[in-house]
Amino acid sequence: VRTAVGSTAQRTPAPTSRGASTRGTISNLEGSTNDAQAIAQVITARFGFPRANVRVLLDKAATRQAIIDSLTALLARSKPGDVAFFSYAGHGALRRNTMTPGKQVDQTLVPVDANAGAEDIRDKELAAIVSPAAARGVVVTLVIDACNSGSITRGGVPQLLKERWASIDERDKAERYTGQFPADVGALVISAAEDTRPAKEGMDENNVRHGLFTSAFLHALMSNSTNASARQIFQSTKAIMQGRAPDQVPSIDAQQARLRQPLFGGNSGDAAGRTTVALTGLRGEKAELDGGLALGLRPGTELARLVNGVLDSNLIVKVERNSSIARSIAVVVKGSEDSLKVGDLYAITRWVAADEPLLRVWVPAPLATEADRDAAIAEARILRASNQITWIDDPTRIPTGSQPLVTVAFENGWWTLRTGREKPVSIGATLRAARVLSAITQLGVKNPVVWLSIPPTRALDAALGIGGTKQEAGITREGAPEGAFYVLAGRVTDQGVSYAWVRANASAADSASSAFPARSNWFPISAAPDAAAAADSLRMRAEALGKVRTWLTIATPPDDGQFPYRLVVVDSVSGNPLASDSITAGTVIQLRLDADTSRLAAAAQRSPRFVYVFNIDSKGKATLLFPSDGTNASNRVPYFMGNKEVWPDAIPVTDGAGQVASFGATDVGVESLLLVTSEQELPRDVFEWDAVVSPEMQRGGAESQIGGLLRSRMGTRGLGARPGSAPATWSLQRVQVRVIAGR
């Protein structure tokens, strides 16, 4: 059966999902199999792909020939208007090709049998397979989670980086490509990383290993409406990734018309909308559900049976445990076990957030004595004066030029020196400037930029109160800097020693493209009494950073697509939506909620919602934009006009006088705009707090602000509480705009 445009019941030909986890001597990837299984589950449960039409190749099955044959067969049987989806999770690499202009290499996907002599799958091979189908009208979507995949169908030249990266294949293909590229003929290509970036994998909020891109992509698929545009899905994915891997930037390649369509093309109302799972088996009085963590079915989640598409509140089950990433065991909490029937569909009615902290930080252990610290500071000053290096006193201002970077820090009782991707070098338990310079010389590093971080005083470490079993406002202390999102850094300047929270791996270039502040303010400590004040200031900023990260990364209940509005950024002069995600500093913008007219009729059948729009700027400051007066008198949708409820086609964000509000983007960086809807009223202080990069900051009370919101309404940890459940009756949309410097 072929799929017509707009059909939601069936999607053929089958999408194909790949997960290549092993490659001989190449380091194994643990998350790619989970990636493929999770994506397959989401597209079937949420986007209407019949399970019989989805083929998944895992591990040893993901050979070069199997991948090519499956993709070729998928596209060969596709007709104009059919939907074809291909995803890949695994290693990426390069292949020598002297016929490729520039650096003479092709990007590749690494099949499981590459070490047995099989060739990698080159970007140009993919283009040759995909482009003819896209050109004849097949709706083709490709999602690639591998290193340097940003131009996987175009042949861009990446840096040689590790992570989901395998070594270059030096066998010269010597083949020129003269065909079309998929995106130029209508295909949509979303990749885990830009050409010069690595793609990473790690543990997600459910303690399941995934590619960090795939994890964010899955969150975006679940939290956005199924009719959200490809651009919206990408923007949401990118925003979530900022909070998990700030140095990994995904890319998207498609024509503008394709970006405005839903992820899998077609009309806006052509997908299932509500996420459903089937009851696949009975285990005594318990039900086995065909859905797991990939769909947000954490223990405690409640689901109601669907009868003719309508929720039956008389039969509700609660997830007891996850038997795998794609299966759950549930018990009946309302109704009778006798009513459980294999094949019945269920939908989420009560949602549980992941059990994860608001923010992970790393605080280096203090030196043994204050005398040791004073001696280290003295040695740092000697190093600072050396003409063999370029000293920097702010790690977020690292030059983007060709000078190599050397970092010196106190870790696990030893001073260590790091340079590039090399393993850290121990330079002793006591800091010596001469030893640092000698190590730099032995490593062959010439004229480096050096950043040295002084550990905190014992008084500061104690006053911070972060670590052990105590969780300060949902902030956890990691055992190593690699697991932290922010680290406590200490700098030595002419004025003394001061401390700040610094985003891991932040640089001057990243600061202009990240939604997260590169650092907080610096707070000096020259004597013991300074420690308490500095600790209080640093703790408040850590709490604010936790709020920022939570809003930008939190996994929300699956959006059912019935709320018919999306947040749109509008040019104040033309009144048209912005053509790109970047604007020049000084540009004046407006905001509005645009309705999907095909969803308005469905919207009338659901409960009203309160609507809030707020922004988080590049300095970490949050401001409520709508409702402008902070009350809940004007932000309820639908509106009342007389005795009639009205869902307008568009809702402008207005000022206190009821006029369309204009906003000037002045600071270079990323502005995050968020649309929150809830069946319950929310207090204003949930959406407002002071900038992280500011000398003064009002505490405001974490419990009354985001802590209370997350605990009582969203169910995350908040102030160290275990995650609770909350009705699945709220939603969140994220839009990010990059503000660049004017000429």
Image: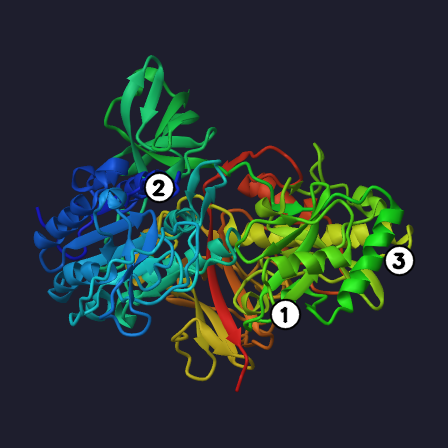
Furthest residue to the bottom?
A: 743
Q: Nearer the viewer, residue 643 or 80?
A: 80
Residue at disc 2, secondary structure = loop
CA distance for labels 1 and 3: 31 Å
Q: Which residue, given by chain and number where applicable, does mark 1 sit on?
A: 447
Question: As shown in the figure, which amino acid type bears the numbered disc 2?
Answer: Thr
Looking at the image, which is closer to me, 554 or 710? Answer: 554
Which residue was labeled with disc 2? Answer: 25
- Amino acid under label 1? Asn
Q: Residue at x 48, y 39 (%)?
A: 727
Q: Position of residue 424 (x, y in %)?
A: 60, 49
Q: Is residue 571 above or below residue 55?
A: below
User: Residue 24 at x, y = what percent?
Assistant: 32, 40
In this picture, residue 396 sits left or right of residue 350: right
Q: Which mark is residue 526?
A: 3
The quadrant where residue 633 appears: bottom right
**Visible residue check, residue 143:** yes
On the picture, is 201 further left or further right than 287? right
